[in-house]
Image: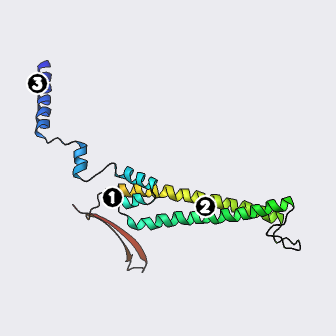
Amino acid sequence: MSSKITYLFLLVVLGFGFSVKGQNLLTSEDVMREEGYNPLSPATAAFYSAIIPGLGQAYNKDYWKIPIVYGAMATSMYYFVINNDTYKQYRTAFKLREAGYPDEFTLEDGTELISRTGLMNAQKTLKQNRETSLLMFAAFYVLQIVDASVSAHLLQFNVSDKISFDPQLFNEPANKQTFVGLTLNYNF
């Protein structure tokens, strides 16, 4: 019984030895290099976008996204500046009124165009708008970094013409109703 196990063991060991020796040994890095896969590409795109917004999109050759990145960030920064300036204007008027001095919202005859409560509410609203604009700027900044990284990942995705997705509308002849049909084809 032990001799059968020994022969089986030798056969398995020698069989694996010959099959391994006869194969062309490629490491996973060699396979990735042959297929055009660069595992550091998403990290590089994200790093470039973190340094200069839009540079990751340029690295991915998505040049059409750069104006969108700068437009979104510039718009949020514009509203931040407008809300901040207006907030300072109302804050200064409120401080002057509290100190007993005339402000820009008080006429020469002493008529108040905006009440004390109105000045306080305007400050509160403008401060919230200013903070929201700043938060949107930060969100757009992070979003463009994520976009650059995801786009770099998807550039390495194998897109083949062998797979197709074709949604169509079908009419049923019996009751004249329209249905949506989906077909997924995979060609070998």
Say what amino acid the circle numbered 3 marks.
Tyr
Which-is-in-front pick, marks 3 and 2?
2
Q: Which mark is residue 133?
A: 2
Between discs 3 and 2, the one toward the N terminus: 3
Give the residue number, with chain letter if any, for mark 3.
Answer: 7
Assign a secondary structure to mark 3: helix
Q: Residues within 10 Å of mark 1 (few under 14, many from 20)?
A: some
The answer to whether residue 1 shows anywhere in this view is: no
Say what amino acid the circle numbered 2 marks.
Ser
- Disc 2, disc 1: CB below 8 Å? no
Q: How many marks?
A: 3
* Residue 181, percent from left and from top: 37, 70
Which-is-in-front pick, marks 3 and 1?
1
**Cα distance, mark 2 to mark 1?**
32 Å
* Residue 123, percent from left and from top: 74, 61
Between discs 2 and 1, the one toward the N terminus: 2
Q: Quadrant of residue 48?
A: bottom left
Q: Which mark is residue 90?
A: none
Assign a secondary structure to mark 2: helix
**Cα distance, mark 3 to mark 2?**
77 Å
Please state if 129 lies on the left or on the right of 188 as rendered. right
Q: Residues within 10 Å of mark 3 (few under 14, many from 20)?
A: few
